[in-house]
Amino acid sequence: MVLPLMSLNRQAPALLTDLYELTMAYALWQNGFADTEASFTLSFRTNPFHGGFAVFCGLGHIIDYVLKLRFDDEDLQYLGTLNGHDGERLFSREFLHYLRDLQFAVDIEAMEEGTVVFAHEPLVRVSGPIIPAQILETALLNLVCFPTLVATKAARIKLAAHGQPVYEFGLRRATGMDGGITASLASYLGGFDGTSNVLAGKLYGIPVKGTHAHSWVMAHDSELKAFSDYARALPNNCVFLVDTFDTISGVGHAIEVGRQLRENGHKLIGIRLDSGDLAYLSVEARRLLDEAGFQDTQIMASNDLDETIIESLKDQGASIDTWAVGTKVVTANGQPSLGGVYKLSAIRHPGGKWRYVIKLSEQVVKVSNPGVLQVRRFFHGTGSERFIADMIFNELEPPGIKNMIVDPLDFTRRKTIQSGCQYTDLLKPIFKGGKLVYEYPSFTSVKEHVRDQLSGFHPGIKRLINPHQYPVGLEAGLHALKTELILKERERFTQPELVQSETDR
């Protein structure tokens, strides 16, 4: 299954990138690096929403993008118009011919869609010729970071709803058309039950739901007449928005039309509350509906909901059966960016050995991890709370018998994993030499994967506020390698004669 991300554009836009990807590619090509191999990893540095986890999303779009990725004549014509600061062409004609024939023959390993992931873990690994691997950076970050945020937000909201239905109603507040479509899919995969977005329903088969707006009521002489007319036109879709003028009166009018529906062999599916004290109003609405014999009529709530508001309403005893969440899920409210990064971790020149590389920083969180990286998740059994810890390790130098992990931000925090634990490696082969070797699962399977994953972690990790920190660390050998490289690089650049020679060169 391949997702139709490009259904609106018909092709993968090769120029969906930052200029520096192409200037670096040009410099690599000019300096004879075209046959050099590299390994890059995509990760994020902090769990979003001050939470304890994230839900990886975007793999389907990566597959779709890479399968269709080519520089076409219009792309190359545009690149040929770009000039440097001296007014001369930025790229030579020969390089543009190289791009025209460039094949993205890389290996891509990635987490499976819907996997629960954590800060510092490689979500995607790209290995192969350095130029195509480098060019992929911006697009992959774009295709992963936003949907992962939305899927994570959706999972948090679904957890707060304790299994009750939740629908995404946010298209009108989304960040552009493509952002709205991406958010509808990501929220669905993260746990939501449907969307109001009809185009997303068509493209992805997501169940579409909707009621009516306040304007429907305002266009009539009375609320009762508005409900009655709507029921006449759509007797099989009657969820009435009852707060246009006065919520309690609106519930009464909905009950009156509900009786008419019942007489004609239909039912009042529900009412929607969109303003006011949702806890109080939902309890009163439930009482009125039950007293009138509409015990099976659902109460839906909307109005800028998110996980904290839903949790609060449930704590207050609100009688709400279904939740409609819009702005705060499609905009990933509370976390404007995932903070994803794409870092070179190993390089190999033709005929040579892999050389591990590292990026240094005065901020510990920004120091990269060297090696051809993989993530191993240890677990016991198959039930709830089964996941023990995640180990980031160098695939070229697999872990020894002693499975010790070291916190990447605090070397004094270590955990030894009991021998004999089961484990699975989380990065799965997606492309080999540019050829797709992975079959993308159904959305139903992805949603089940998210639920199963979340059930496998301690409840503390899923807390909305001050969550427990799940153990994620570097394999002890990888931590030693990283420390060695840090000391080596810092020593090299603190020797005055070396600093001078680098400057003079």
Image (cartoon, rainbow, N blue to C red):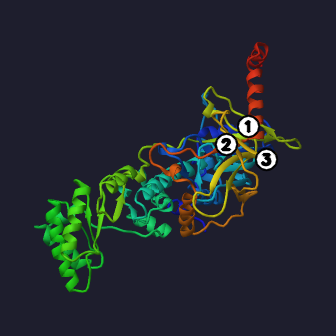
Point 86% across, 41% down: residue: 353
Disc 3 is placed on an element classified as: loop
Q: Is residue 264 above or below residue 438?
A: below
The foreground one among 453 and 383 is: 383
Left or right: 404 in relation to 153:
right
Measured in 3D between alpha carbons, the distance from the residue under mark 3 to the one under mark 2, in whole angstroms, is 13 Å
The foreground one among 37 and 387 is: 387
Point 66% across, 49% down: residue: 390
- List the residue tagged with mark 1: 479
Mark with earlier residue (3, 2): 3
Quarter of the N terminus within the rendering: bottom right
Q: Amino acid at mark 2?
A: Gly
Q: Amino acid at mark 1?
A: His
Which numbered disc covers residue 268?
none
Left or right: 124 in relation to 303:
right
Point 62% across, 31% down: residue: 364
Corner quadrant of residue 119 = top right
Q: Position of residue 84 (x, y in %)?
A: 61, 32
Residue 241 visible in image: no
Left or right: 444 in relation to 248:
right
Which numbered disc covers residue 473?
2
Q: Position of residue 217 (x, y in %)?
A: 18, 65
Left or right: 318 in relation to 243:
right
Mark with earlier residue (2, 1): 2
Measured in 3D between alpha carbons, the distance from the residue under mark 1 to the one under mark 3, in whole angstroms, is 11 Å
- List the residue tagged with mark 3: 399
Q: Say whether marks 2 and 1 touch (CB < 8 Å).
A: yes
Q: Say whether marks 3 and 2 touch (CB < 8 Å).
A: no
* Label 3 crowd (10 A; few <14 / some 14-19 / many >=20): some
* Label 2 crowd (10 A; few <14 / some 14-19 / many >=20): many
